[in-house]
Amino acid sequence: MKTLKYLFFILCLPLFAGCFEDETTVDTVRISEISIDTLKMQKVYNIDQNEELLIPTEGLVSQSERQLPLTYEWEVNYKFYSDSSALRFTGNELGAFPARLKISNEHGSSFYEFTLNINSAYEKGIAILSDNSEGEPLLSIMRELSDREIAEGKKHFFTTNCLAVNNPGVEFPRQPTDFRQRDKQLFISFKDKPSVYALNSKMLNVENIITDGNPDFIPERLLVVDGTGAASPVISESRKIYKMATLEGLIVNYGRQMASTYDKNVVLAKGLGYQDAIIFWDMEKETIVDFYNYYYEYSAADQGLDFRGHSPIALYERDGNYFTMITCKDGVFMKTSIAYTWTIWNSDYTQQSFGLSDNQVVINGTPALTSESPYVSNTTYQCLFYASGNKIYRWYYNTATSFPTEPWRTLDDLEGAEITSLAVSPDNQQLYVGVYQPQASGLNGSFYLLNCNTGKNEGDSPYLNVAYKPLKVVYKPR
């Protein structure tokens, strides 16, 4: 038995020796590692919606040893997107999306993670609603540029025809009358086929069309406050007021409230945090009315103020607490200032009284200011800008006892230009001026950006041929 065991051991020795003495003829493989030059890539890429982004990899990739065949894989939002060496990405949805580049050879892979920010091409900026002689509407928007875009030398520009581009197949009515933004919607009213179109404020696609079967409802002025209120007054062509339920998309009557008729030009909507104040001129009772918080109807006549025989000229924000109405009677101009809340507390908060500041204070002179004039107040400089023809006037409403006789700025570089809309920037430092040349055809509307202090052009102003006749120029928040 022992002889067999020894014999088995002797026979296995050559096998053990072979294991220890095997000399392979294959070279040792050196791993060819992949490196991505991350300094030539960005951690965050910003593009506008529907814009194509191209990220090439040529010159970004190196291998430590042999140049092996490479494969590419791009992921967007944790999903496979492309296996091309260069990423061609079109952002259809707004938002921030995680992305990853994976580059592989037969030895391994390398990765680079980044973020794709898809921004609206219509983010905050300046918007112009205009129409041509046939009443065709046009919405033009100039988006604010980021610091990076400005550093790269990019110039501000207007994107025109925003309604048609973002609503293929939608035929908008003619004769636009007003537009306002509330929260995430932009509202545009139309006289032809009377209606109010609610658009997504970022994508500008139509989300709702608000109409009413009442033939009297022809919207001319939208009093939509920049807040989250669910209902807003609308002044019709008949000067009656209707309630627009913005969430439900309905038009209803106010009933016994606000049952008179009201001037469409002399009106002011002011948001006061959780409460709003809508100031009107009651055409039948010839007085100032404050529709406070859409419930309380305060009348200046009830406080003993007599405006009989007065014509309303302008209504503007004096400061954060008071509004001012300019009226004219027998050729004499006067100003009256009242608190938005209508009543104010005394110093020790023990008693309330009517918040009257100026009571028909006479303003000397005959201004080039009518109820049809474009005008806007600037609470920082405490002045009222108003326009006539191609001239802009500035009146310091708290200190000046007379209207100015000379214009503050004349736009004489555009032949036959007429100013049709004025607005101020949110910080009150810039004046937005919409003008048009009635003798010209096509895009005969232009835009001026002026410094509110000096009156000088800012940016690349003027921006020529960016609209039709401007009906309203506003700052469009995000």
Image (cartoon, rainbow, N blue to C red):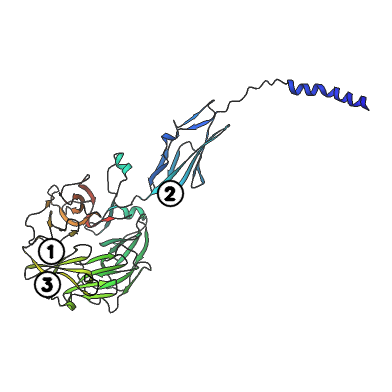
Say what amino acid the circle numbered 3 marks. His
Binning the other alpha carbons within 10 Å of mark 3 as few (below 14), some (14 to 19) or many (20 upward) gives some
Residue 79, given in percent of the width and then of the height, sits at: 51, 46
Which residue is farthest right?
1
Which residue is identified by label 1?
A: 370
Q: Is mark 3 on a helix, strand or loop?
A: loop
Residue 406, given in percent of the width and then of the height, sits at: 7, 54
Is residue 282 something that shows in the picture? no
Q: Residue shown at 12%/56% (left/top)?
A: 393
Q: Residue shown at 26%/62% (left/top)?
A: 178
| Labels 2 and 1 touching (C-beta < 8 A) | no
Say what amino acid the circle numbered 1 marks. Thr
Which residue is identified by label 3?
A: 310
| Labels 3 and 2 touching (C-beta < 8 A) | no
In the image, residue 41 sits, relative to residue 443, either above or below, namely above
Residue closer to the observer: 121 or 355? 355
Residue 96 disc label = 2
Quadrant the C terminus occupies: bottom left
- Decide which of tag 1 and tag 3 comes sooner along the chain: 3
